[in-house]
Image (cartoon, grey):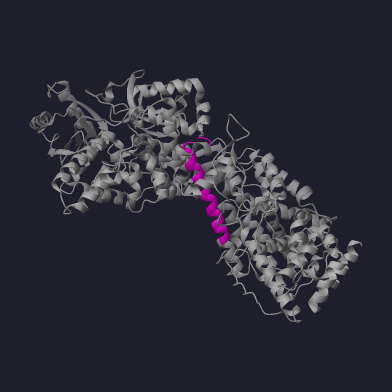
């Protein structure tokens, strides 16, 4: 029997089932339909699955038919039957179903209807009526389920955009395996999947039936694997095909959906590989911190530095801001009834805030509307579209309305049509992409001139500051970041006038392309229409596109300049925070002053305040005050003086240098250094300073802060807001939000990488550890005060507010002094032993149990290293491999054993043997071989201690001097050579050959605190 005839028989059988179920059940086996149903297309099986679901058929086993036809059913998705071959009941639906499907929106959360309880009573002959109702509910249920599962804002699975870590070959194999797989699932799920697939096959027809409710299908055929993702891989330089790594999880969901892929956009903006961007997106989504990612997830980020991670994070936030504002605008326009299909598509294509503003500006509340909008309101839009599509039938004179403003004559009608066409051209994505690409190939310059208003009435001092930019012009590709910031500041002060120059050749080529290629009319244009068409293109460029390009260029230049300024601020701050500490000596801090005297503070080697005083060195009492200073230095055995670089610094330095040259402080060999006191005054009146030094006068607190900045710069400088440290450029002209986020991230990075001793660090320092905040740091301090010192990292889990995620982020950056812990545990053991002898019954039973639980905690030698607790198992296996002992960490024997194994098997071979990555193994080796108390700051320069002073008059051209970098900018580095004023090293004189080869540098640059040797070329006092 042929297929159409058999389909007809099935339809007849279906109708008989509705009227006489018993008769049908007797007829089916005799008709020999079982074998036929096993071989033919799946839509017949689906219809019988519906019947089975409805409980109409009884006693006829469709399970064998359904399961046996699954492989052919999967294939039927790719090759769907034509609509006329489908049974008639699949092509029929009610109007209420269509209305329900159209009214439903996938983004809104729809409460699912509760399932109807199964009816056990006998079925009547009126089974046809409830059938349609239940079937309709089933179709809607499946539709909702399918829509909710695939509502991914970015990177649908079928495009394979988010599975970037997976090679194509593996993807194909996985798909074929998953397609051939027949999972065992409950019948109800099986029927739902049939129903969804049947609708999918209907969608694949070239001419789908309009009567069938269309269900949006976004899942690919891999969904038949029932959410078993294939193994992900990453690319490495040594192995471009990728190596297996730990899976990062399932699909990446973004809150707002756009027409562009966020991973690809992020890769284009930051020049980072897409697979790295995908991993970072997942890591940031899981609330991982930058220090944790940079140290413990190197294999997932291709060993990127923290600065690069911050750049990706900022770019990601910008893209999400654009997406969020875009959808806010869409909802607003939709509510106002202004949203059209073309406008929606244009908004979803926006990648920057400038593009979003360009597209949405005419529709904002309070806007008078554009010329194009006013022309559309007059009814000229059909004329404009007809000019492009069907100009032969266009008659502009028919639009003239003598009594209507804007349509009174042919000139006004042509102007309105021109405005509509210009608006269409200016908002077309392909047109804008062409003009942007064209500008990249041409010479575009930015020009600044002295404003006419400022030249007549203005502050001459301010005008002279911008003398370099009175007549300035530069290619936008070559202009420096500091020049952009300077020009912007001059423009804001109304001293400069700035404009972007785009050559006329760009306009000519653009207009030719629009007329002859992109917007070429489909039919012949009359001369008057061709003139109108050309005028529209020129109007679009001059009035809409050129201003947009100028805004985009200025915005891009300003954004890049601000980012570079913020990054430079961050690099300088990192260099300042990582200045090598001066430990093991008492220090005298001096806050210079004239009228109110110089404030003194002497601190111990452990930063305890020993003495504070005030001396008047510059009011004729210098000799008498010298006796007091000598007595204090001898009393506290202090041989190092730290002088703040504020007011009276130069005179105070000369005073101490003269006494040192005369050996006045003998037998002490006293030296001094100059410290940057930026932010010390602000800190001295802060709540943190009042809490730390409640009994001290704020003026004396600043002297204490100056001394501690040399003893432990990191611990002291984190108390001050980073922007007050004075190591930036144009910090008031950049985005304050971006600046604060970057500087806080740099502080967190420095504190985490240096590490803190959990049992002695302050609360202020602890709150800057990755994963911790003010409340968690406070809880740690309270736990420490209540229960005594921490014994190991595992005890951190007992602190209130420290969950698994927080522990994961902070554990690797917290250190434990093993000698202190061993001593504490030994004392506790002795205390327990003595108390056990004195206690007989149960008087002290509770206290004893408390002490026992504390003593049961055993110290872990790995807690003093940078190894993360998640890698302790690998570290112990590595120790077993090399024959080492955890108690030998940091000793020379450990280094020798590690070298023997690594030289024999190699780093990659050892990592493979331990089933770990090379980066993790290298981190374990570093942690085991670094000496106890290792500090990464030892690689940085210490303060420059001096015994004599150099005067400005002593300088001469050609002299070789040693100085310390004060600040670094994109145009040069300022160096303090001890004459009271800093010297400038232009950036063109800083080359790789002149930099120290000892230090590992990520870029050509010097940072604050670095010691340099300079050659004086000229002397100019500013």
Which quadrant of the structure image shows residue 402? bottom right
Q: Nearer the viewer, residue 244 or 431?
A: 244
Describe residue 120's horizontal placement relative to residue 933 as left or right: right
Q: How many marks?
A: 0
Q: Is residue 283 magenta?
A: no
Percent position (x, y) of residue 646?
25, 37
Assign the C terminus to one quadrant of the image. Answer: top left
At 31% from the left edge and 49% from the top edge, which residue is drawn? 777
Is residue 404 visible in the rendered image? The answer is no
Describe residue 761's horizontal placement relative to residue 351 as left or right: left
Q: Is residue 313 magenta?
A: yes
Percent position (x, y) of residue 188?
66, 64
Q: Nearer the viewer, residue 564 or 786?
A: 786
Is residue 969 visible in the rendered image? The answer is yes
Majority secondary structure in the magenta region: helix
At 46% from the left edge and 28% from the top edge, which residue is drawn? 1004
Q: Is residue 689 above or below residue 481?
A: below
Describe residue 713's horizontal placement relative to residue 325 as left or right: left
Q: Which residues are magenta?
A: 301-327
């Amino acid at each position: 029997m042929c297929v159409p005839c058999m389909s007809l028989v099935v339809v007849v059988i279906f109708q008989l089932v509705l009227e006489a179920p018993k008769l049908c059940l007797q007829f089916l086996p005799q008709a020999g339909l079982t074998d036929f149903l096993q071989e033919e297309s799946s839509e017949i099986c689906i219809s019988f699955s519906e019947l089975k679901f409805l409980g109409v058929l009884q006693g006829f086993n469709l399970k064998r038919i359904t399961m046996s036809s699954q492989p052919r059913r999967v294939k039927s998705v790719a090759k769907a039957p034509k609509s006329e071959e489908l049974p008639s009941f699949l092509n029929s639906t009610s109007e209420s179903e269509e209305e329900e499907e159209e009214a439903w929106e996938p983004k809104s959360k729809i409460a699912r209807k509760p399932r109807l309880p199964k009816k056990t009573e006998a079925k009547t002959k009126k089974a046809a009526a409830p059938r349609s109702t239940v079937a309709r509910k089933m179709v809607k249920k499946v539709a909702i389920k399918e829509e909710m599962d695939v509502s991914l804002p970015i990177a649908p699975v079928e495009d394979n955009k988010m599975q970037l870590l997976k090679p194509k070959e593996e993807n194909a194999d996985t798909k074929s395996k998953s397609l051939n797989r027949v999972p065992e699932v409950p019948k109800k799920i099986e029927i739902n999947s049939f129903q969804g697939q049947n609708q999918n096959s209907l969608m694949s027809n070239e001419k789908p039936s309009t009567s069938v409710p269309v269900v949006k299908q976004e899942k690919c055929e891999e969904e038949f694997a029932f959410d078993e993702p294939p193994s992900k891989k990453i690319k490495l330089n040594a192995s471009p095909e990728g190596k297996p790594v730990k899976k990062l999880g399932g699909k990446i969901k973004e809150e707002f959906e756009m027409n562009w892929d966020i991973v690809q956009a992020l890769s284009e903006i930051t020049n980072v590989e897409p697979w790295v961007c995908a991993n970072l997106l997942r890591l940031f989504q899981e609330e991982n911190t930058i220090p944790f990612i940079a140290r413990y997830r190197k294999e997932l980020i291709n060993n990127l530095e923290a600065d690069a991670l911050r750049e990706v994070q900022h770019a990601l936030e910008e893209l999400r801001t654009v997406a969020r504002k875009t959808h806010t605008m869409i909802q607003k326009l939709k509510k106002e009834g202004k949203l059209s299909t073309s406008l929606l598509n244009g908004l979803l294509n926006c990648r920057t805030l400038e593009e979003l503003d360009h597209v949405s500006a005419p529709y904002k509340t309070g806007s008078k509307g554009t010329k194009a909008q006013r022309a559309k309101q007059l009814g000229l839009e059909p004329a404009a579209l007809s000019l492009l599509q069907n100009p032969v039938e266009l008659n502009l004179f028919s639009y003239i309305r003598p009594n209507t403003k804007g349509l009174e004559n042919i000139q006004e009608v042509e102007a309105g049509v021109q405005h509509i066409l210009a608006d269409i051209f200016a908002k077309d994505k392909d047109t804008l992409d062409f003009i942007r690409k064209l500008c990249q190939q041409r010479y575009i310059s930015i020009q600044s001139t002295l404003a006419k208003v400022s030249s007549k009435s203005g502050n001459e001092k301010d005008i002279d500051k911008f003398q370099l930019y009175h007549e300035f012009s530069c290619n936008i590709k070559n202009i420096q970041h500091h020049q952009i910031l300077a020009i912007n500041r001059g423009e804001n002060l109304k001293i400069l006038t700035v404009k972007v120059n785009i050559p006329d050749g760009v306009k000519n080529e653009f207009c030719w392309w629009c007329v002859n290629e992109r917007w070429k009319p489909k039919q012949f244009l009359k001369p008057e229409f061709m003139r109108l068409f050309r005028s529209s293109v020129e109007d679009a460029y001059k009035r809409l596109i050129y201003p947009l390009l100028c805004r985009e260029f200025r915005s891009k230049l300003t954004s890049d300049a601000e980012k570079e300024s913020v990054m430079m601020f961050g690099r300088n701050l990192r260099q300042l925070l990582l200045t090598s500490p001066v430990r093991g000596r008492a220090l005298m801090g001096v806050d210079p002053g004239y009228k109110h005297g110089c404030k003194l503070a002497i601190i111990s080697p452990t930063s305890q305040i020993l003495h504070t005083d005030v001396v008047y060195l510059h009011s004729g009492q210098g000799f008498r005050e010298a006796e007091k200073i000598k007595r204090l230095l001898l009393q506290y055995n202090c041989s190092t003086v730290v002088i703040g670089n504020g007011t009276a610094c130069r005179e105070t330095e000369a005073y101490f240098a003269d006494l040192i040259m005369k050996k006045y402080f003998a037998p002490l060999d006293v030296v001094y250094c100059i410290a940057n006191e930026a932010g010390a005054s602000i800190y001295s009146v802060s709540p943190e300073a009042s809490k730390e030094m409640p009994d001290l006068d704020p003026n004396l607190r600043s002297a204490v802060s100056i001394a501690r900045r040399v003893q432990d710069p990191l611990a002291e400088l984190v108390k001050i807001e980073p922007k007050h440290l004075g190591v930036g450029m144009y910090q008031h002209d950049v985005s304050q939000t971006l600046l604060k986020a970057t500087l806080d991230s740099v502080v967190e990075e420095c504190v985490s990488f240096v590490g803190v001793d959990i049992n002695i660090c302050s609360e202020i320092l602890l709150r800057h550890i990755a994963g911790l905040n003010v409340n968690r740091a406070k809880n740690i301090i309270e736990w420490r005060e209540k229960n005594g010192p921490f014994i190991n990292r595992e005890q951190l889990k007992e602190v209130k507010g420290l969950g698994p995620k927080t522990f994961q982020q902070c554990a690797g950056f917290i250190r434990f002094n093993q000698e202190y812990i061993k001593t504490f545990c030994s004392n506790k053991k002795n205390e327990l032993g003595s108390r056990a002898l004195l206690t007989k019954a149960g008087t002290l039973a509770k206290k004893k149990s408390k002490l026992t639980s504390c003593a049961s905690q055993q110290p872990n030698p790995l807690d003093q290293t940078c190894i993360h607790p998640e890698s302790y198992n690998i570290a112990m296996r590595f120790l077993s491999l090399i024959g080492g002992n955890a108690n030998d960490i940091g000793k020379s024997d450990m280094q020798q054993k590690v070298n023997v194994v690594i030289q024999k098997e190699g780093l990659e071979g050892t990592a493979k043997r331990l089933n770990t990555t090379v980066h993790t193994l290298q981190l374990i080796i570093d942690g085991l071989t670094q000496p106890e108390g290792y500090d990464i700051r030892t690689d940085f320069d210490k303060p420059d201690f001096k015994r004599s002073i150099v005067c400005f008059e002593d300088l001469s051209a050609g002299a070789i001097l040693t100085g310390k970098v004060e600040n670094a900018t994109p145009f040069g580095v300022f160096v303090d050579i001890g004459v009271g004023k800093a010297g400038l090293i232009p950036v063109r004189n800083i080359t790789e050959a002149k930099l120290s080869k000892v230090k590992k540098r990520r870029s050509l640059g010097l940072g604050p605190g670095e010691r340099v040797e300079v050659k004086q070329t000229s002397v100019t006092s500013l």
